[in-house]
Every structure is written in C-alpha cells, then in structure tokens.
Image (cartoon, coloured by chain):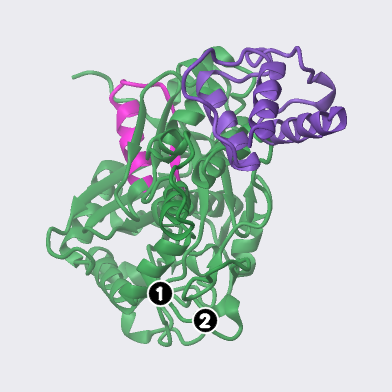
Amino acid sequence: MPKLHRVVVTGLGAVTAIGTWPGALFEQVCAGSSGIRLLPEQTPMPPIPMAAWIESGIDSDPKTAAHDRATQLALTAGRLALEDAGLLEDGVLRSKTGVYVGTGAGPSGTMDQTYRRLYAEQRDRVAPMTLPRGIHNAPASELAIRYGLRDANNTYSIACASSATAIGEAMRAIRHGYSARILAGGTESLLNYGVLHAWHALRAHAVMADPLSASCRPFSADRDGLVMGEGSGFLVLESLDSAQARGATIWAELVGYGTSCDASHITHPDSSGQIAAIGMALNEAGIPPAAIDYINAHGTGTLAGDTVEAASLNAVFGAHMARIPVSSTKAVHGHLMGAGGAIELIISVLAMNQHIIPPTANCRIPDATLGIDMVAEGARPARMNAVMSNSFAFGGSNAVLIARRMQDQ
Amino acid sequence: MVRAMSDIEEQLYQLLMKELPVAREGLTRESTLESIGLDSLSTIEFMFQIEDHFGIRFEQTGTPPKTLGDVFDEVHAKLEHA
C-alpha cells in the first residue's frame, strides 16, 4: 500500500465582519462581539436589512476590486493564509500548490447586478466581463492566477458544507500523495437583493432583534433563525514531510474528515447522516469520541438545526457530552454559508492554540432540552488536544473535520 | 473644442485608473493599451465602460485601438456626431 501522508495546517487567513485573521477575528469571537448590523442604505432595501457584512479589511487595490465581491474576499483571505504560511516569497513552492475552494452561491453579486440592469433598469446589454466574473470557479482561478498556484484547482458547491468539503477533499489529496500543498477554504458573499429575498421567503431567517447584534441566538430557547454573513477563510494544508522540509510553523494536524448525505429532505437535517459523517471523521482520526475536547457546531440558530445536531452529538458522544463543550460562533460572524466551514475550522484551530473555548454568543436562555454544554456564559479557558467542526448543508450533505494539536513531529 | 477634448481625456484617464493600478503620470496619448496592462478581454470591458459613461456606442468592426490616443479620438468623434 502506498504511503499515507500526515496532513498539517501551516497557514491561516480569514476576512469576516468581525475582523481578519491574522487580526482581531479570534478576539472578537471570544468577546462575543457580533458583526450583525444594518445593511448599507440601498434601493430597494431587502426585506430584512441586516447581516454580518464586512465594512473593512478587504484588499482594495484595483486588480482585486475589479472582481466580484466573493472573489475579492477569497483573494484577501488567500493572501493572508499564504503570507502566514511563509509562501508569498517562494514562487517555486507556490507553483506546486493547489487551490480547493468551497462556495455556495459563487459570485452571485455579479449575476444579481446583471439581472437588475436588464430587468429593473431596462438596459439592453450587460458588461462583457459578466461571465468571467460570474463563474463559480472564478475565486479559485483568480487565486491561482494571482499567486501562480499551478496544482489542482477545484471548486465545491455544496451549500453550507462547501468549504468543509473542499478542506476535507484537499486533505485526502495530500494524504494520498496527489498534492503536497493546497490552499483550501471557502468564500461567500451573497448579501444581495435577490438572495436575501429568497432566504426571507424560506422563513429560516431571524427577524431583527433589539439590540440588532443579538438577532442570531443559537442553542437559546428563544432562538429565531439564522442571520446571513459574508466572508472568506483559507488554510494552507501541507504534507508533514513538506512542512518539515521547509521548516514551516505548524498550527495543527488535520486528522479526520467525514462526509455523508442524509438522502431524506432538501432542507430538514437528519441525525443518521450527521452521525455517519461524525463517525467517519473520528474513525479516520483514529481517536475515540472521548478524545474530542471542543466541538464547533454547525449551530445555525434554527430550531430544527439545533435540535437535530444536538441529538446527533448525544448519539455519538453519549455520556462524554457532559464534559465536551459545544459552541456555535455563527451568532457573531453570521452564517457564512459556503465559507462557514473554513472560518469555523480556523476558529477551532485558534481555540486549540490559544487555549480558549469560544462562547455561543446571545445564548441568553440555554435550551436545556438539547443536553449539550453550549458555553453560554462566555469564553472559557481550556487545554485542548483535539477539536471538531461540523458543517451540515441544505441538500443533506454533511462534512465533519477534526484537527489535533501537533504531536511527535 | 481643445478644452472639451482635454476634459474627455481626463474623464477617460479617471475611468482607467478605477480599473487598473496605473498612476495618472504614466498615462499619455501615446501609451499603448498593452503597456498599461489591458489585454484583449479587459480592453473590451474598458470600451464598454466608456460607452456606458458617455452614452455612446463604438462600431463592432474596424481596427481595434492600439493606444489611448486611438481610444480618445474615437470617443471624441462619436461625441461630435452624437
């Protein structure tokens, strides 16, 4: 059997409504400071004009600004991750690096603007760059073009499991020797009029609370639904051999990936599928459930989502749930859809490195029926050796990732 | 008319600087589109924005512009006959 490679994380980069990484992101997550705010004034205003949208931190040079916002976010977070991994100065290594991107809606803003121009403004033509900007793989391709990343370039679109799947598949490609190094993550920016209307119509979106920043309340008995966010997160994944050969700093080892499909309902989650994905990730990691020290939940703040995920966790972890903290960070960075898995894995890796478990913000009435410790009281100091991040998508696709503190290098 | 021409040129420079990382000092009538970083695709996009900005339409046939001066002359001619 060919050698299976250990896969490590050597770079982290993110841009969100509550800051970047490197930057204030993790501090804001731990403080429970929400980035949910009123959308900028626009005509017409969306039905629920709030989201965790990004006010600053996006690269603004003309070459980046010319792209769709989802691509701008990817170029920003990708740059931060490559820089963090020490790869910006090494064109040869970058040329042997792949790009795996997860995005639910891709460059949806470009298409929204195009339809507005045609239907609302009654113009008779659209911008020539509409297609090159609007294709789903534009973020991955533009990252490759900008940084000369010439290995495999793949885009995954699996709703809220997109970037977790991209990271998991990248991990497999490295583990099995197809690639030595991959920039893996996701990007999402779908805070445009048409998409916001679609979420409103589905009635999964929270209404505006007072204060507005408390509108998303995962695991709270008074939860009211999800709140959209935008952002991008990337990790540089690398074989341990490659990382050691170049003396890279290692954030964590990526040890487990599980993926499954509920195959039962297009929106309602199902525990059996989630349990299968969690079990597969634990099995690959080669660790028992009791070895997990923190779970970053999918935790969207919908009743169905919270209830089914808690049932799945209790089924897999049983009595260990009494000592495994579970938090959802979506209350502060919003639901980043296809980019959520990447941001939440980055937060989980940072939690393990900084010995702080992020809280579930706005969980003002912890739902006791869930049977989980949702870290409602605020950030909690803890020593962690292994962390798990869940991403459960519309369509029934599930992706679970497990990272471990780097051992025996 | 000379003044009007320079106004048009200045507006075109401003449009261009929104799209490309170029400084105003580096732009002249003699600058080739290639030298300032416009490839065939981005030239089409630039021409589209000019059309939108001035409310004009270029012919789809004929020799593609090579320099900024070619673009300015074409815009000027279109505006004169508008």
Label 2 residue SS: loop
Q: Is residue A395 visible?
A: yes
Query: What is the letter of the green chain?
Result: A
Q: Is residue A407 visible?
A: no
Q: Using the rendered view, name the quadrant where residue B52 is placed.
A: top right
Which of the chains bears the disc numbered 1? Answer: A
* Magenta-span inclusion, residue A4: no
- Up the image or down, A77 lies above or below A341; here it is above
Of A29 and A405, the residue lying toward us: A29
The span shown in magenta is A163-187
Label 1 residue SS: loop
Q: CA gap, disc 1 to disc 2?
A: 10 Å
- Up the image or down, B78 lies above or below A67; here it is above
Q: Amino acid at mark 1?
A: His
Of A226 and B70, the residue lying toward us: B70
On the image, the x and y values in percent for residue A127 come to: 49, 39
Of A342 and A379, the residue lying toward us: A342
Residue name at image x 18 percent, y 55 percent = A276
On the image, the x and y values in percent for residue A355 come to: 58, 56
Q: Which residue is mark 2?
A: A208
The answer to whether A62 appears left or right of A386 in the picture is right
Rendered hue of chain B is purple
Which of the chains bears the disc numbered 2? Answer: A
* Magenta-span inclusion, residue A183: yes
Whether callout 1 and callout 2 share a subunit is answered yes
Q: Using the rendered view, name the quadrant where residue A37 is placed.
A: bottom right
Q: Which residue is mark 1?
A: A205
Q: Residues within 10 Å of mark 2 (few under 14, many from 20)?
A: many
The answer to whether B31 appears left or right of A258 in the picture is right
